[in-house]
Image (tube, grey):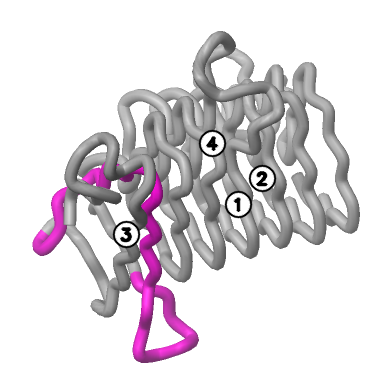
């Protein structure tokens, strides 16, 4: 693993699809080159012999785990993504200038970002190729737990994007800065066209200056200039 291609050439990647099924229990730095760089029209599915366990992708704090840059039609499912780190944005997964991608039955835990999005970072350029009516990401049955960022969005960060989220659990994430205020320990969103969140739990997340809940906003969620709809969402102990 390392570079995941949906076709041989650039034209192939726009039309062809590749499905990769991972059968091993864990892919780490001993057998995998991280980060995995996704290409358009690619599906990666984890298949574990034990139905109660997800196939694990573990970059062992050497890099982010997955990069999705200027891609569409990427589907990731049935995997646990752990121990990613970024000196920029997106400790575990970074999604930039991309559309019509999907995460399903995933767990993201133990990520660290020096900037934004300890678990997952999603952002599109304002004047880029992603149109206002494009769906950037669909997330179904995804757990984002115990991730940290120094700036906004300890668990999830997104901007200039449209998202549909169903069955998301955002638990135990934080953004803590020793010098200034930053917001959105669980989820941070700014300048988003629309986001729909259904049947989800946002619990025990923290945004603070000192790590003791002082001065910052949105321990669970912080939205700025966002059109949001939420249904059956539990927000507790943030």
At a point 14% along the width and 50% down the height, the residue shown is 33
Above or below, 215 against 106 in this view is above
Say if the magenta span includes residue 84: no
Viewed as shown, does residue 75 lie left or right of 203? left
Q: Name the residue under label 2.
A: 205
State how far apart marks 1 and 4 are (Cα). Answer: 28 Å
Left of 237 or right of it: where is 149? Answer: left
- What residue does disc 1 label? 172
Residues shaded magenta: 30-55
Name the secondary structure under disc 3.
strand
For marks 3 and 1, the one nearer the N-term is 3
Mark 4 and mark 3: Cα distance apart in space: 17 Å
The one nearer the camera, 147 or 143, is 143
Q: Earlier in the sequence, mark 2 or mark 4?
A: 4
Q: Main secondary structure of the magenta part?
A: loop
Q: Mark 3 points at which residue?
A: 18
Q: Residue 99 carries which label?
A: 4
Residue 123: image x %, image y %?
53, 26
In front here: 32 or 3?
3
Q: Is mark 4 on a helix, strand or loop?
A: loop
Distance between the alpha carbons at the discs numbered 3 and 1:
35 Å
């Amino acid at each position: 693993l390392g570079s995941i291609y949906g076709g041989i050439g650039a034209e192939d990647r726009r039309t062809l699809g590749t499905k990769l099924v991972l059968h091993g229990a864990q892919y780490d730095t001993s057998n995998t080159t991280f980060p995995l760089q996704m290409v358009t029209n690619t599906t990666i599915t984890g298949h574990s012999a034990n139905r109660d366990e997800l196939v694990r992708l573990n970059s062992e704090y050497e890099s982010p785990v997955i990069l999705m840059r200027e891609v569409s039609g990427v589907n990731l499912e049935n995997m646990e993504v752990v121990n990613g780190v970024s000196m920029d944005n997106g400790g575990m997964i970074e999604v930039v200038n991309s559309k019509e991608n999907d995460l399903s039955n995933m767990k993201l835990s133990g990520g660290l970002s020096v900037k934004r999005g300890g678990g997952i970072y999603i952002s599109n350029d304002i004047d880029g190729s992603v149109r206002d009516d494009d769906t950037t990401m669909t997330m179904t049955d995804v757990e984002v737990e115990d991730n940290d960022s120094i700036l906004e969005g300890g668990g999830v960060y997104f901007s200039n994007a449209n998202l549909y989220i169903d069955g998301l659990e955002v638990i135990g994430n934080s953004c803590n800065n020793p010098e200034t205020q930053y917001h959105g320990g669980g989820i941070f969103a700014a300048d988003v066209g629309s986001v729909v969140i259904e049947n989800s739990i946002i619990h025990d997340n923290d945004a603070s200056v000192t790590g003791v809940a002082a001065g910052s906003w949105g321990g669970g969620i912080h939205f700025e200039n966002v059109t949001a709809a939420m249904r059956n969402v539990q927000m507790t102990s943030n």
